[in-house]
Image (cartoon, helix red, strand yellow):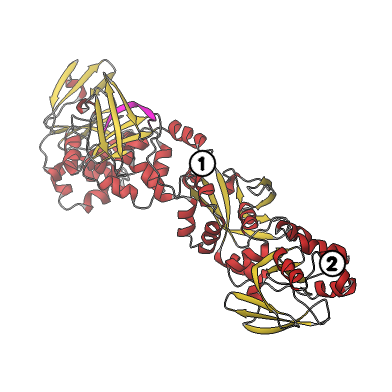
């Protein structure tokens, strides 16, 4: 019987074309289907019939049939109705060969019925076992299928050897259980184009959803997606994906709309909690015929179309997007994932971790490890601690790091060609965008390139850059440093000797600065009561030489010193012995007195100050 219906399909196609010819001029006996098709030039039909073993003979052997044969246009319309690309696809859309058998049999009555023999109303039992209603009125014959669709006979009484063909203008559909659409087909039919785009943007997700044993999908409308774009200030799905943390989180969002079980609205209780494919729980509430969905943050979407059954479950269309806990990383976690270990060390050293974690919104231009390495090299520092010393301490490290942070979220696609931002350091940073390339310029005009943009974090975004940006750093001069360290007697001595201008004008210098106690110890050793007594005793020229003996005309941080003893020139014209043992530094004067550096590496504008616990004496 299956073969018979396949044959009848070919026959109906034949007659739809045959009926379009004005007259068949052959004599009796009437032609077979194949003969008539050949005479009409239906070579493709003949080839199709003869391509199926036994088809030609089976059609010829039927004793009596009436075929209601749809035209080619009718079949084309049926393909369109079923969203089928060709006849093979139509078979799939109908649910396979069994349903095709039913459809084709529904077009064939196992008896001959010419139009002149029809009553006004005729009920025929077809080869499909279902009844067909044929109405005949003067000048018109119509056929009504199981769904109430009406086809018109546009060419009646085309006689063949074993019966008659009536050509009709539509395909008749019997009562059959059509296969339920897939999720993709249902979404397409419902016009949920943004959802489809989102699903296909996640590799493997369409196949996972289509192959799932049972699912309930809460499917956002296009308008729901548009509203989500607006909330996230994204112009399209691509930008939204970036802002929520990438394709992995898009999968999490979409999975949050899917329950791995079939839940028709009729089966819902007043309150239902479902675990979704994202692993997080969604709440579905039902009041009368109204159904709503609530996410973990309490956002509510209404179900606007319920119970769209699909091949492996059901779809409920909703008017809002549900958001799970996205689990976006903190800035620290993002830096760890990106391997920005030096930046993390710097943030920890500056004590800025909590500040960055608690900022409402921020954009971080995060230097790579290679960028920090280049900065260390530029400052002549071997490690972060040395760099901190050379830039003036932790306060200035905080300023440098703050200069990399803008207190607002700025993804790359939100930037204009030129952008000026005020940073956490209180200074302005210039960000330039050319095409997809983004660069950042610091206070000195140095330009860093963004090498990895748009890493979404819990409170903003990180852009990785290839240079450390430097703000304007205000290091103290030697006088200000001495004031900050309360070296009042040294300042008085410098003033008395008139050396202030010389020291401030020095291009580079290292100052071994005695504490007030060191001066007190010297006065006591010389049985003097004041600095004035010292000046009067030694003379102004000698005091000037003493002070100059504390100044080396080059910058030497403690970590730049070679291990062991070394002779360094001073402004007094004599050599000073400086010894480094591990982290300890001592200085020895011409009298053989050795003193300790008690506070090393105080950076100043033109060098460095080391505070010592004694006054160094040159040859006097």
Real-space Cα separation, disc 1 to disc 2, in angstroms: 81 Å
Q: Is mark 1 on a helix, strand or loop?
A: loop
The answer to whether residue 366 is above or below residue 97 is below
Placement of the C terminus among the 4 image quadrants: bottom right
Q: Does the magenta stretch include residue 606?
A: no
Q: Is mark 2 on a helix, strand or loop?
A: helix
Chain-order first, disc 1 or disc 2? 1
In the picture, the disc for residue 91 is none
Task: Residue 362 in the image: state x and y as whole percent.
Answer: 56, 45
Query: Magenta stretch?
Result: 298-310
Q: Report which quarter residue 13 is drawn in.
A: top left
| Residue 149 visible, this angle | yes
Count residues near mark 1 (Cα–Cα under 10 Å), then give few for <14, some for 14-19, many for 20+.
Answer: some
Count residues near mark 2 (Cα–Cα under 10 Å), then give few for <14, some for 14-19, many for 20+.
Answer: some
Task: Residue 619 in the image: state x and y as whole percent.
Answer: 81, 82
Instruction: Identify the residue under disc 2.
Output: 533
| Residue 15 visible, this angle | no
Instruction: Identify the residue under disc 1.
Output: 236
Placement of the N terminus among the 4 image quadrants: top left
């Amino acid at each position: 019987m299956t073969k018979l219906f396949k044959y009848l399909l070919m026959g109906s196609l034949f007659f739809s074309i045959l009926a379009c010819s004005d007259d068949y001029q052959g004599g009796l006996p009437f032609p077979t289907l194949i003969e008539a098709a050949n005479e009409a030039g239906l070579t493709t039909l003949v080839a199709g019939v003869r391509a199926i073993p036994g088809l030609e003979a089976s059609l010829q052997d039927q004793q009596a049939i009436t075929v209601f044969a749809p035209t080619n246009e009718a079949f084309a319309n049926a393909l369109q109705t079923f969203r089928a690309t060709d006849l093979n696809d139509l078979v799939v859309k109908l649910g396979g060969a069994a349903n095709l058998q039913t459809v084709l049999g529904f077009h064939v009555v196992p008896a001959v019925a010419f139009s002149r023999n029809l009553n006004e109303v005729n009920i025929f039992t077809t080869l499909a076992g279902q009844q067909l209603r044929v109405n005949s009125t003067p000048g018109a014959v119509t056929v009504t299928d199981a769904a109430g669709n009406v086809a018109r006979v546009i060419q009646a009484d085309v006689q063949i050897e074993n019966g008659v063909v009536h050509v009709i203008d539509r395909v008749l559909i019997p009562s059959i259980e059509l296969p339920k659409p897939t999720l993709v087909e249902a979404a397409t039919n419902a016009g949920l184009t943004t959802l489809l785009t989102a699903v296909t943007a996640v590799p493997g997700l369409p196949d996972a959803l289509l192959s799932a044993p049972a699912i309930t999908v809460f499917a956002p409308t296009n308008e729901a997606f548009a509203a989500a774009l607006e909330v996230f200030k994204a112009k399209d799905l691509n930008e939204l994906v970036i802002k929520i943390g990438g394709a992995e989180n898009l999968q999490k969002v979409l999975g949050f709309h899917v329950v791995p079980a079939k839940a028709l609205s009729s089966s819902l209780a007043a309150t239902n909690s479902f675990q979704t494919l994202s692993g997080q729980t969604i709440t579905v509430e039902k009041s009368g015929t109204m159904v709503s969905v609530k996410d973990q943050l309490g956002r509510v979407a209404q179900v606007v179309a319920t119970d769209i059954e699909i091949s492996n479950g059901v779809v409920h269309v909703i008017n809002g997007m549900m958001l799970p806990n996205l689990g976006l990383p903190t800035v620290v976690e993002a830096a760890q994932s990106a391997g920005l270990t030096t930046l993390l060390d710097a943030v920890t050293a500056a004590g800025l971790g909590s500040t960055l974690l608690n900022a409402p919104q921020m954009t971080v231009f995060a230097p790579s490890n290679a960028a920090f390495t280049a900065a260390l090299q530029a400052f002549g520092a071997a490690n972060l601690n040395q760099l901190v010393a050379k830039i003036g301490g932790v306060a200035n490290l905080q300023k440098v790091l703050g200069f990399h942070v803008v207190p607002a979220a700025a993804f790359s696609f939100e930037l204009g060609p030129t952008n000026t931002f005020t940073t956490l350091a209180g200074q302005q940073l210039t960000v330039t965008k050319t095409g997809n390339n983004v660069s950042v310029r610091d206070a000195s005009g140095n330009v860093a390139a963004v090498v990895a943009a748009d890493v979404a974090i819990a409170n903003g975004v990180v852009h990785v850059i290839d240079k450390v940006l430097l703000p304007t750093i205000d290091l103290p001069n030697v006088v200000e440093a001495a004031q900050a360290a309360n070296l009042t007697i040294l300042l008085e001595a410098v003033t008395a000797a008139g050396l202030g201008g010389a020291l401030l004008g020095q291009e580079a210098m290292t100052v071994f600065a005695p504490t007030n106690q060191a001066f007190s110890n010297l006065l006591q050793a010389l049985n003097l009561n004041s600095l004035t007594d010292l000046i009067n005793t030694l003379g102004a020229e000698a005091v000037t030489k003493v002070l100059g003996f504390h100044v080396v005309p080059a910058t030497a941080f403690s970590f730049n010193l070679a291990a062991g003893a070394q002779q360094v020139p001073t402004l007094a014209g004599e050599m000073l012995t400086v010894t480094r043992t591990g982290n300890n530094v001592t200085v020895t004067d011409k009298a053989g007195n050795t003193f300790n550096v008690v506070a090393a590496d105080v950076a100043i504008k033109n060098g460095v100050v080391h505070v010592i616990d004694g006054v160094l004496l040159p040859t006097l």
